[in-house]
Amino acid sequence: MEIWINPACSKCRSALTLLDAEGADYTVRRYLEDVPSEDEIRGVLDRLGLEPWDITRTQEADAKELGLKEWPRDAGSRGRWITALAQHPKLIQRPIITADDGTAVVGRTDEAVRDALSR
């Protein structure tokens, strides 16, 4: 199990606290420092069963500068979104937990973190 975090994020810290309380075996990836490649983002999207716009923090300043709210959300634009996430990792929703069964969840709630633990 791996968790992508931003240490400044309260939801990430809460997820780590819960994982520790449950005795989970996991590794931490500080994705703002260890930036995921486009291929890694594609892989985590496949595991999440989501599209890139589903995990994009559109309220961030970078998103506004890029005009992401106006970008098409279709198959033809998927690569453009993934490139933006790789170039601006702060736009990636967090925390993302990759579960041992090959799936992943966005762990913004205790329920989502527990769901990842049960997989």
Image (cartoon, rainbow, N blue to C red):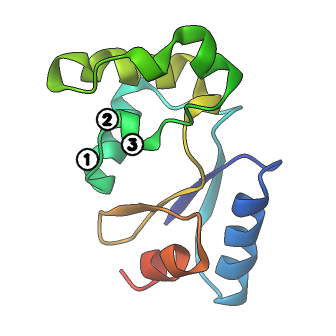
Amino acid type of disc 3?
Asp
Amino acid type of disc 2?
Arg
Q: Residues within 10 Å of mark 1 (few under 14, many from 20)?
A: some
Cα distance in 3D space between marks 2 and 1: 6 Å
Q: Position of residue 44 (x, y in %)?
A: 37, 46
Residues tagged 2 and 1 counted as in contact (Cβ below 8 A): yes
Residues tagged 1 and 3 counted as in contact (Cβ below 8 A): no
| Residue at which label 1 appears | 46
Q: Position of residue 7 (x, y in %)?
A: 80, 50
Q: Secondary structure at mark 1?
A: helix
Q: Residues within 10 Å of mark 2 (few under 14, many from 20)?
A: some
Compared to 31, does 100 lie above or below? Answer: below
- Residue at 30% in and 39% down: 51
Cα distance in 3D space between marks 1 and 3: 12 Å
| Residue at which label 2 appears | 42
Going from the N terminus, do you reach mark 3 or mark 2 first?
2
Amino acid type of disc 1?
Asp
Cα distance in 3D space between marks 3 and 2: 13 Å
Q: Position of residue 30 (x, y in %)?
A: 69, 44
Q: Secondary structure at mark 3?
A: helix
Which corner quadrant of the image does residue 62 belong to?
A: top right
- Residue at 63% in and 32% down: 59
